[in-house]
């Protein structure tokens, strides 16, 4: 079976993890500090606070931005559930806005329509889905015009760019995940980035039980800290991230070239001013269930990101979001399917995937 995702860890990760074990500093320590700084540098941000997951990163970013009960935050219904769950954690209310059919990312025109309808909306939590940037020119215009807080969920977009600038460097705060299926990993892990010192100080406090100095806790905080062990893996992975992304892009381009002519499927969209880092390579096919079985039966891993709008999840239905309809999300969710694009794929595997897909119809 060609797996849909495969983390690549080897000698360097093991060496650094052993160093941490030998140091006795298993929890906090210099590896966490170095990783935070190096990752922030890579994205082009001044400050980084490494945390335990992409989810705790989102929760922290929203809290640091002052989002809480009574606030409304615009986000996309076509994402992993953590994006909108993090809004719920703070007591705020997610306001869902539909996506664009080409990019699968939140539609700036629909954001503006929502803002006109409800001037109370305080923040935007955007998601750069599958490794492709949102339309940052239009989004930054809206942020200015409506004086919004911007948080970027970059859990799938480490190294993705818009107009040559990395995503994660546009918002007041941005978050990344280092789960093993992402473009780089720390096992479980995440980070909150910002250019604003005050927001960084607040985030650093939130993830460490609201502690300002030893055993003095001036806000309600959490234990969301990253471990030194995880950061050791991250330091080794970060050195390889550019090469991992390059291989993902080559794999994605190989599929683009070989699959573009098939009229029964849709390949991912591209834009000259966006660097796509192919966290997922997604196709759209009308008879998806049959196509998915065909791939699985022939040894090609595949996965559906995501089978429905977040608002159709049982918990969200209970909250009353089930009545809302999102035309584009629903259409895309019924047809989308991801195939393997990760950097561990061999040329033979890439060719096998292409040959199989071409032989389907
Ligand atoms: C993976 C992911 C998260 C959550 O990250 P975890 O590290 O799994 O908590 C959040 N948002 C998106 C879009 C993701 O893909």
Image (cartoon, rainbow, N blue to C red):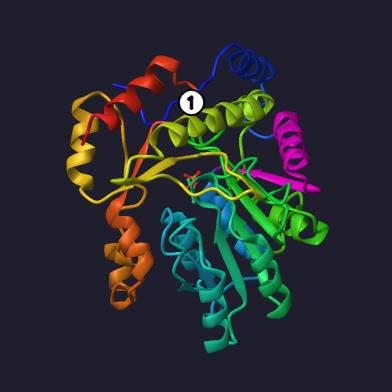
Q: Is residue 183 visible?
A: yes
Relative to 60, 5 lies left or right:
left
Residue 328 is a magenta residue: no
Residue located at (23% from left, 39% from top): 292
Q: Quadrant of the N terminus?
A: top left
**Residue 160 percent coordinates (x, y):** 63, 44
Q: Quadrant of the C terminus?
A: top left
Q: Which residues are magenta?
A: 29-52
Residue located at (72% from left, 63% from top): 218
Observer-nearest of 200 and 346: 346
Observer-nearest of 194 and 201: 194
**Crowdedness of circle 1 by 10 Å Cα count: few (<14), some, many (20+)?**
some
Residue located at (55% from left, 74% from top): 109
Residue 48 is a magenta residue: yes
**Residue 214 percent coordinates (x, y):** 76, 49
Asked where in the image residue 328 lies, by quadrant, the reply is bottom left
Q: Is mark 1 within 8 Å of ligand 1?
A: no
Q: Is residue 186 visible?
A: no
Asked where in the image residue 149 lies, by quadrant, the reply is bottom right
**Residue 226 percent coordinates (x, y):** 61, 39
Observer-nearest of 72 and 75: 75
Looking at the rendered structure, the secondary structure element under dot 1 is loop
Observer-nearest of 55 and 173: 173
Q: Is residue 179 above or below residue 113?
A: above
Query: Which residue is identified by label 1?
Result: 7
Asked where in the image residue 295 lies, by quadrant, the reply is top left
**Residue 301 percent coordinates (x, y):** 31, 30
Q: Is residue 65 above or below residue 50?
A: below
């Amino acid at each position: 079976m060609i797996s849909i995702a495969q983390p690549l860890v080897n000698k360097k990760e093991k060496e650094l993890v052993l160093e941490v074990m030998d140091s006795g500093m298993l929890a906090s320590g210099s590896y966490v500090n170095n990783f935070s700084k190096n990752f922030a540098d890579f994205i082009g941000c001044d400050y980084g606070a490494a945390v335990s997951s992409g989810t705790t990163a989102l929760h922290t970013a929203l809290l640091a931005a002052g989002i809480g009960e009574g606030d409304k935050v615009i986000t996309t219904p076509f994402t992993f559930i953590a994006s909108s769950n993090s809004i719920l954690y703070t007591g705020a209310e997610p306001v869902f806005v539909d996506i664009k059919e080409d990019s699968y990312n939140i539609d700036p025109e629909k954001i503006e329509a929502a803002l006109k309808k409800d001037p109370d909306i305080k923040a935007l939590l955007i998601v750069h889905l599958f490794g492709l940037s949102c339309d940052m020119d239009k989004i930054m215009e809206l942020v200015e015009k409506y004086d919004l807080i911007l948080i970027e969920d970059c859990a799938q977009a480490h190294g993705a760019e818009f107009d040559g600038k990395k995503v994660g460097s546009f918002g007041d705060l941005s978050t990344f995940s280092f789960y093993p299926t992402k473009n780089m990993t720390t096992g479980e892990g995440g980070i909150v980035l910002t250019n604003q010192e005050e927001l960084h100080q607040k985030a650093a406090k939130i993830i460490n039980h609201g502690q300002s100095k030893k055993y003095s806790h001036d806000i309600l905080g959490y234990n969301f800290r990253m471990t030194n062990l995880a950061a050791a893996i991250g330091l080794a992975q970060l050195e390889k991230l550019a090469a991992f992304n390059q291989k993902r892009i080559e794999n994605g381009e190989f599929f683009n070239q070989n699959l573009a002519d098939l009229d029964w499927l849709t390949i991912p969209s591209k834009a000259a001013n966006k660097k796509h880092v192919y966290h997922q390579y997604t196709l759209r096919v009308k008879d998806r269930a049959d196509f998915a079985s065909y791939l699985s039966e022939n040894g090609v891993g595949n996965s559906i990101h995501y089978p429905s709008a977040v608002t159709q999840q049982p918990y969200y239905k209970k909250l009353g979001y089930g009545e809302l309809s999102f035309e584009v999300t629903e259409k895309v969710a019924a047809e989308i399917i991801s195939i393997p694009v990760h950097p561990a794929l061999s040329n033979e595997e890439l060719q096998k995937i292409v040959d199989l897909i071409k032989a389907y119809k």
